[in-house]
Image: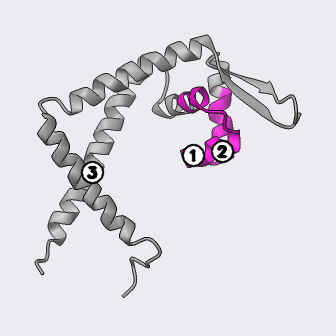
Amino acid sequence: MEDNSQQINDVFANFRRIGIAYRNAASRQLNDMHITHEQCALLYLIEQSDMTQKEIAQKLKISEATLSGRVKRLEKMHYIERVQDQNDKRKYDLFITPSGKKALDEAKSIVDRLSKQCFEGFDDQDFALLMSLFQRVYKNLEKMKGENACSD
């Protein structure tokens, strides 16, 4: 079996570079709107679902305290409203406002343009190959479920 450790490391390094470059480009463009990538993700979840704040925090993989800070900032920007739950006065439901919806639509447009720019020059065969390779990597990772990948 050929030792391809360096190639594997290079692939993962490129994944990281792409992720960082994409996030930085999105952040620069969203900065003109005075909104962060994280705030956009939160607006999107609020618009798309009827999740509790606890569920949103879990979905975003952040603490409830971090989420609370983001909610307060978006509320201050008039992008969301917190309304006390009718059935449980301890809970607040989150709703996107018309200005929040407008900001989210603009952000989606920016991200869509950036995503298309990332794959400029790709044809259907390129996409099919890329998806096939990603699916193979994912299947290999799925095989490891329940196994201790770090065992001797």
Q: Residues within 10 Å of mark 2 (few under 14, many from 20)?
A: few
Q: Which residue is mark 3?
A: 15
Is 88 rendered above or below residue 141? above
Up/down of 129 relative to 22, above or below: below
Disc number for residue 59: 1
- If you read the primary sequence from the N terminus, does the residue marked by circle 2 or circle 3 appear first? 3
Separation of marks 1 and 3 at Cα, in angstroms: 22 Å
Q: Are marks 1 and 2 in contact (CB under 8 Å)?
A: yes
Mark 1 vs mark 3, foreground winner is 1
**Position in image of residue 81 (x %, y %):** 71, 21
Q: Amino acid at mark 1?
A: Lys
Q: Amino acid at mark 3?
A: Phe
Residues under labels 1 and 2: Cα distance? 6 Å
Q: Hey, which quadrant is residue 80 in on the image?
A: top right
Quarter placement of the N terminus: bottom left
The structure residue drawn at horizontal position 86% and vertical position 37%, both measured from the top left corner, is: 90
Q: Does the rendering let one see residue 92?
A: yes
Q: Residues within 10 Å of mark 3 (few under 14, many from 20)?
A: few
Q: Which residue carries the number 2 mark? A: 55
